[in-house]
Image: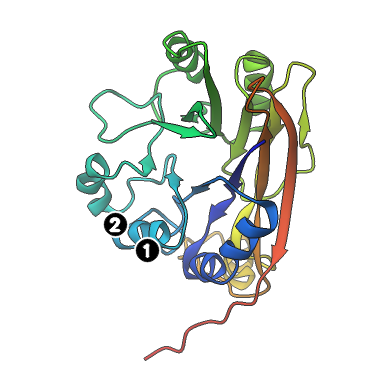
Amino acid sequence: MIKILFLGEIVGRAGIAAVKKGLDGVKKKYEIDYTVANGEGVTNGFGLGKAHALQLFKMGIDLLTGGEKLFYKLDMVEFLPKASFILRPLNYPQQTPGRSVKNITIKDRKLVIINLQGNSDMRQNIQNAFISIDSFLKKVEDDTISIVQFHAATTAEKATMLHYLDGRTAAVIGTHTKVLSADDFVTEKGTGYISDNGRVGAFMSVGGFAPENEIHKLKSQIPERSKESWDDGIIQGVVVEINEITGRCENIVPIKEKVSIERPKEN
């Protein structure tokens, strides 16, 4: 069995601390062959900086993905073409730097991991996700196992993508909301699915951010910078188990591992 860990969005320094403290244990516990993580909220909760990307790669994350926040840090624009371990969405313009798919081999089986972004409520003018993935899958060799990480805002669009790709990909893993959903399952055709694989960082928070600031913003309607939370460290995600003979998903296992994290002392 091929076991791929899809971590939820890593949020801020607390997310990095959770990875440092607990990732090795999770990988050992679930006998993971390959690790993928959404990294677009790593740097202060908004974007992915070069230094943080390299740090997470050295900690054992094999592949980082991002959606609409990926280019919030300017050094990522220059770094992305050189970083084979980071994926931007497939349906971005051709002029967008970087890669959108990752070809790997596990247990003598070829796999391709595809990063795709939804269109509903994302406020970006990008190609239709369904047309983009359809065009790409036509080029994939028959003996290659395809897996899609779908970064989309609405559950409806994610569920629609599942039905569109049912039997054509081994999994459709949703990201973006940073809340681990309870709808994990495997279809009769062998496609694993979850609407959102959660987050890595602080559990007692608002998407990884301190509740006090988020409450104040909603009460006052005055823009205010979100602040990271350090309450109740957690690693969330899913383990996708794929039969290396059939190429079908046989199980998808949500993970919720508590880890101890501490806010660093300020100088």
In the figure, residue 185 lies in which quadrant?
Answer: top right
Please, is residue 111 above or below residue 58 in the view? Answer: above
Circles 1 and 2 in contact, beta carbons < 8 Å:
no
Q: Which quarter of the rendered picture does the C terminus lie within?
A: bottom left
For image coordinates 55% across by 23% down, the residue present is 145
Residue 216's label in the rendered image is none
In the rendered view, does 64 fall on the left or right side of 167?
Answer: left
Residue pictured at 62% horizontal, 72% vertical? 212
* Camera-nearest label, 1 or 2: 1
Residue marked by disc 2 = 50
Which is nearer the eye, 106 or 51?
Answer: 106
Number of marks drawn:
2
Q: Is 204 left or right of 216, judged from the image as shown?
A: right
Q: Mark 2 is on which residue type?
A: Lys
Q: Is residue 135 left or right of residue 156?
A: left
Residue 92 seen in the figure: yes
Which label is found at residue 55? 1
Quadrant position of residue 242: top right
Question: What element does badge 2 sit on?
Answer: helix
Q: Quadrant of the N terminus?
A: top right
Mark 1: which amino acid? Gln
**Counting other residues with Cα less than 10 Å from the Cα at mark 2, is it few (<14), some (14-19), or many (20 or more)?**
some
- SS of the residue at dot 1? helix
**What residue is rendered at 72% in x and 21% in y?**
190
Residue at point 61% right, 55% down?
199
C-alpha distance separating marks 1 and 2:
9 Å
Note whether residue 123 is visible: no
User: Residue 16 at x, y = what percent?
Assistant: 49, 66
Q: Which badge, 1 or 2, is on the more N-terminal residue?
A: 2
When asked about the image quadrant of residue 202, the answer is bottom right
- Coordinates of residue 161 in the picture (x, y in percent): 62, 21
